[in-house]
Image (tube, grey):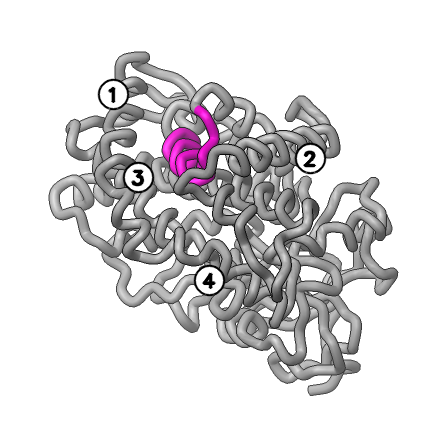
Amino acid sequence: MTQLDARETVFDPTDPDTMAVRVPHDEMLRMRRTAPVSFVPQEPQARAGFPDHEGYWAISRHADVAAVSKNQTDFSTRENGVIIRMGPEMTRDEVEGSSFLLINNDAPDHTKLRQIVSRAFTPRAINALHDSLKARAEKIIDDAVEKGEGNFVEDVAAELPLQAIADLLGVPQEDRGRLFEWSNQLMSYDDPEVEGDQMVAFAEILAYSMALADDRRRHPREDIVTRLISADVDGRGLTDDEFGFFMILLAVAGNETTRNAITWGQHAYMADPAQWELFREQRPRTATDEIIRWATPITAFQRTALREVEVGGVLVPQGARVGLLYASANFDEDVFEDPFTFDITRDPNPHQAFGGHGAHYCIGANLARMEVDLIFNAIADRGLRIEQRGEPNRLRSGWVNGVKDLQVAYR
């Protein structure tokens, strides 16, 4: 197959209007079967900030998503970043400015920057947090039960990831509510229901990060901020931009994605009480990865082709943006038996929900798994039956499988 043989699709898996209602699994299933590598044309506002190639190439099969994720020779995250759909007002200069983000760097810069914080996220380092996070998870559930009912997202799902990353960063307790609001605003630029301005939130979190850095220079601690301001990269420290973007990545990615995994996990358990009973009685270790696969909190990231390259038998041109459809790969029937069944005993479970495998595999994956596990164990330990009181209010986003509100009652 050649570039000329590749099919064009009029369906865009990153359309935020679709994602505000549902993840388009039926359409992506057809893509996998009929046009697994296909060109997706977009209107100008849908590709704001990117070179005018009129769209991107959608990669829908698990094997192809995995292959591109691991291929640093032919594909770049630096050229256009990993976020596949920016806001309609995004400029090219703003996209290029985001290259300070760790995930928007290629080797060798990415390798050097990742090493600065990688020790804070090793299995040993994360295991050391277990007891304190377990106590937090138990208190979160007890507080929610005391309320009787409410928004599961804010009362339960968001709280443990927020507290965990704030602990690692050394953010004082009184400032953590602001961190939550900034995170919401930064991730919700395509959702008119979310109050606030993305660029204002961006400026505020940068200013706050610089103030934290000044404090740590005077009063060093055993936290990530101190590690960042003390870092040595080829004989120099981090620039203010590098430090600020590091903080944004850790603060936002450290709580937003896990929050959505926990929320969709609870939604799945309420929809299938037999799976909840199975978890409550047996606590299979496979449950957490099935929740993460099922949720796929990040539905798509992108790469940019550095040269003409074949993907799945299709020639993708140099300079093209390539969309890695994790929400398609994680339901690929060639890899997962009965993929549209929520099965907490699924094993193996080679999902791509942590940004694919390779150099850009999520640095916080171990922490995210622990947080999901602790929350559901705390719920099960209390013998709770959580009842759904309304449909999830989904985030309008082209690449985040987010939930703003899920009303529940605790019984």
Question: Sequence order check: which comes first, mark 3 or mark 1?
Answer: 1
Secondary structure under tag 4 reads loop
**How packed is label 2: few (under 14 Cα within 10 Å), some, or many (20 or more)?**
some
Q: CA distance from mark 4 to mark 3?
A: 21 Å
- Residue labelled with disc 4: 352
Q: Position of residue 262 (x, y in %)?
A: 38, 39
Q: CA distance from mark 3 to mark 2?
A: 35 Å
Q: Quarter holding the C terminus?
A: top left
The three-letter code of the residue at mark 2 reads Phe
Magenta span: helix, strand or loop, mainly? helix
Q: Is residue 171 left or right of residue 96?
A: left
Q: Nearer the viewer, mark 3 or mark 2?
A: 2
**How packed is label 3: few (under 14 Cα within 10 Å), some, or many (20 or more)?**
some
Q: Are marks 4 and 3 in contact (CB under 8 Å)?
A: no
Question: Sequence order check: which comes first, mark 3 or mark 2?
Answer: 2
Question: Sequence order check: which comes first, mark 4 or mark 3?
Answer: 3
Q: Quarter holding the N terminus?
A: bottom right
**How packed is label 1: few (under 14 Cα within 10 Å), some, or many (20 or more)?**
some
Residue 273 seen in this snapshot: no
Residue visible at 54% across and 62% down in the picture: 29
Q: Nearer the viewer, mark 2 or mark 4?
A: 2
What is the span of residues highlighted in magenta in the rendered image?
A: 158-172
